[in-house]
Amino acid sequence: MSKSRKVIVSCALTGAIHTPSMSPYLPVTPDEIIAEGQRAVEAGAAILHVHARDPETGRPDQSVEAFARILPALKETGAVINITTGGSPFMDVSERAAPALHYAPELASLNMGSMNFGLYPMLARFPDLEQQWERDHLENSRNVIFKNTFEDIGFILDNGGKNGTRFEFECYDIGHLYSLNHMTKLKGLTGPLFVQSVFGLLGGIGGHPEDVQMMRRTADRLLGDRYQWSVLGAGANQLRIAAMSAAMGGHIRVGLEDSLWAGPGEKATSSAQQVLKVGEIISGLGLTIASPDEARDLLGLKG
Ligand SMILES: C[C@H](N)CC(=O)CC(=O)O
Ligand SMILES: [Zn+2]
């Protein structure tokens, strides 16, 4: 058994930010999302971060029924299933939390603060969006607040925690790490805390190396050895941020939810392509990609 450090690769398959006519490779239907999940796990992903969509329009769909069409097959892959509670920033918290509270997964995402969620700059990047709702989705982000109050966070922690679900704590800024530290104390949460630092989403922290170092240093100071650190870089930041994390003792999240790209101007043909690229970075640094069970051990998941 290799003694080199294990790096957990999470893969976010489709999300609720990107829309169908931005990329022909964005999975929309249940079959497409399932096939993408299977490919991502074959490529080395240990955790699948799952959103659902309406198969006709591609609109984000946070209903329990929509998840029923994808979860069983994704579970068959053996990967850790991480159900979103972020849904889309245009949804309210009870709608967003419903699937994770219903299916009691090993892992669910939990967003650690309210914030602006600027998607509208993508209007310039994608001038030929086919459906009106796609244009509205970006345009309306000028005035949306991704609401995650301490009460909302407490609601998801309490009700999800009852099911033995643990959390992917999405921290989009330094303040979110302080909120996480506060909530862990308030709720008596024990480690390992799975911290997912989000870089480069407009409204949160940028993707500069100093931002990455600042997040890491602050997490070390506040959370000490109670956490496992992972990163995701939005859009063109993805692979660069991933490489920094691997070199800084962290884990990595990729997938078409977070970035449609495989390189400058090159659309990724699947999330698996991004998983393979970070796999090369990981082995290039003499590290080893973690299996789903190794990820469960590292994160103290219920299995
Ligand atoms: C930047 C990512 N889309 C954040 C995310 O994945 C939120 C969630 O699903 O809870
Ligand atoms: Zn998500």
Image (tube, rainbow, N blue to C red):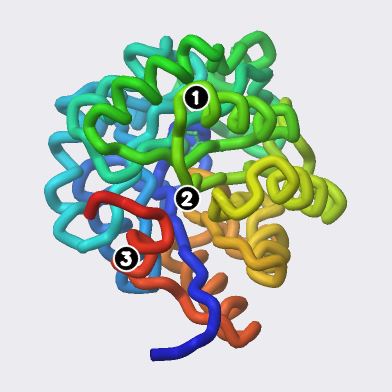
x then y, percent, for residue 290: 42, 72
Picture coordinates of residue 129 (x, y %)?
53, 31
Image quarter in which the C terminus is found: bottom left
Give the mark nearer the N terminus: 3 vs 1: 1
Residue 124 figure quarter: top right
- Local secondary structure at mark 2: loop
Question: Which one is in front, 51 or 135?
Answer: 51
| Residue under pointer 2 | 192
Element marked by disc 1: helix
**Comes first in the chain, label 1 or label 2:** 1
Three-letter code, disc 3: Pro
In the image, what residue occupies the spot 14% across and 35% down? 68
Extreme residue in the right direction? 210
Identify which amino acid the numbered label 2 is placed on.
Pro
Label 1, label 2: how far apart the Cα atoms are: 38 Å
Residue 63 on image: x %, y %: 24, 22
Query: Residue at 57% across / 27% down in the picture?
Result: 112
| Quadrant assignment, res 117 | top right
Residue under the image location 21 percent in, 43 percent down: 30
Binning the other alpha carbons within 10 Å of mark 3 as few (below 14), some (14 to 19) or many (20 upward) gives many
Disc 3 designates what residue?
Answer: 292
- The residue that disc 1 covers is 134
